[in-house]
DNA sequence: TACTAGATCGGCT
DNA sequence: GCCGATCTAGTAG
């Protein structure tokens, strides 16, 4: 908890902004988790995608509240974690006010601290090869494995001292690349994927 | 490097 | 029943 309180944690006001604003401004910030044994996991967010209830058929919230997506309507600053393809989890940051149904999917992270623990979570061992290190957190499913995030963490509050995001200098707009989103079939034309140019932990190509 | 298929299961039609 | 906001291992070139 000392760690959580000493860092410059993002506030409720940050998360209640518009989903596209939050998505862009999350780039460069540190996604942090404190394990029960005190291990501090953190990494720089380098790739995100925005999802929105309005005009976005790819969003889980598009058709309204269900048991599965109810966290998306709980208001900015919550963590929405869902199960996909029978074996993986994906982590999203909820944005906007209550009932917004908008979220930012974390797709790429550059590991900073707790790398040994992340390696053990993902590959069963630390002391990673270069190849393993480069594949540690460059994708949404990989991030959840490395941070050991699962259904249990669905709905957690990012204003807590166990899982949170700490502030950092904004990435200059010249270093932010905007493209369409990956891996979806609907609303594919929306340019709502943002990543840091030339960063090796961006997923895909 | 590039493409293909397989793993595996909860949510929704 | 069907299919997905994924990842890996395998094969071919």
Image: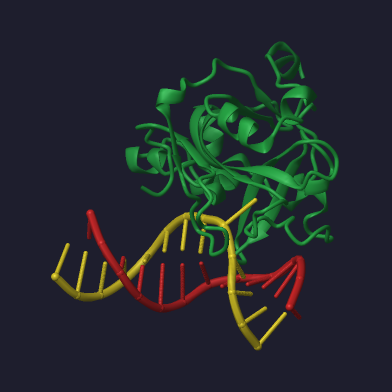
Chain colours: A green, B red, C yellow
Q: Residue A156: x, y in percent?
A: 79, 39
Q: Does A22 sit above or below residue A105?
A: above
Residue at 75% of width from left, 44% of height from top?
A153
Residue B9 falls in which quadrant of the image?
bottom right
Q: Does A32 sit above or below residue A204?
A: above
The quarter of the rendered structure image containing the N terminus of chain A is: top right
Let me know if residue A78 appears in the view: yes
Residue at 54% of width from left, 15% of height from top?
A169
Residue reaching furthest top? A6
Residue at 77% of width from left, 23% of height from top?
A13
In front of the other: A34 or A128: A34
Image-based side of A180 in relation to A41, left or right: left
Q: Residue A69: x, y in percent?
A: 78, 55
In front of the other: A203 or A184: A184
Let me know if residue A163 appears in the view: no
Image-based side of A172 in relation to A38, left or right: left
Image-based side of A97 in relation to A89, left or right: right
Residue A92 falls in which quadrant of the image?
top right
């Amino acid at each position: 908890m000392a760690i959580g309180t000493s860092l410059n944690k993002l506030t409720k006001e940050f998360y209640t902004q518009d989903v596209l604003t939050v998505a862009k401004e999350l780039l460069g910030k540190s996604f942090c988790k404190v394990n029960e044994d005190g291990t501090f996991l953190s990494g720089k967010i380098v790739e995100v995608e925005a999802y929105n209830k309005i005009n976005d058929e790819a969003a889980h919230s598009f058709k309204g509240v269900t048991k599965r997506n109810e966290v998306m309507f709980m208001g900015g600053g919550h963590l929405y974690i869902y199960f996909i393809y029978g074996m993986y989890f994906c982590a999203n940051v909820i944005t906007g006010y209550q009932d917004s149904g908008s979220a930012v999917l974390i797709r790429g992270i550059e590991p900073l601290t707790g790398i040994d623990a992340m390696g053990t979570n993902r590959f069963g061992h630390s002391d990673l090869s270069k190849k393993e290190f480069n594949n540690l957190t460059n994708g949404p499913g990989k991030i959840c494995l490395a941070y050991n995030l699962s259904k249990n963490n669905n709905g957690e509050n990012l204003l807590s001292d166990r899982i949170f995001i700490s502030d950092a200098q904004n990435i200059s707009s010249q270093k932010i690349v905007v493209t369409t989103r990956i891996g979806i079939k609907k609303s594919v034309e929306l340019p709502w994927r943002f990543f840091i140019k030339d960063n090796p932990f961006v997923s895909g190509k």
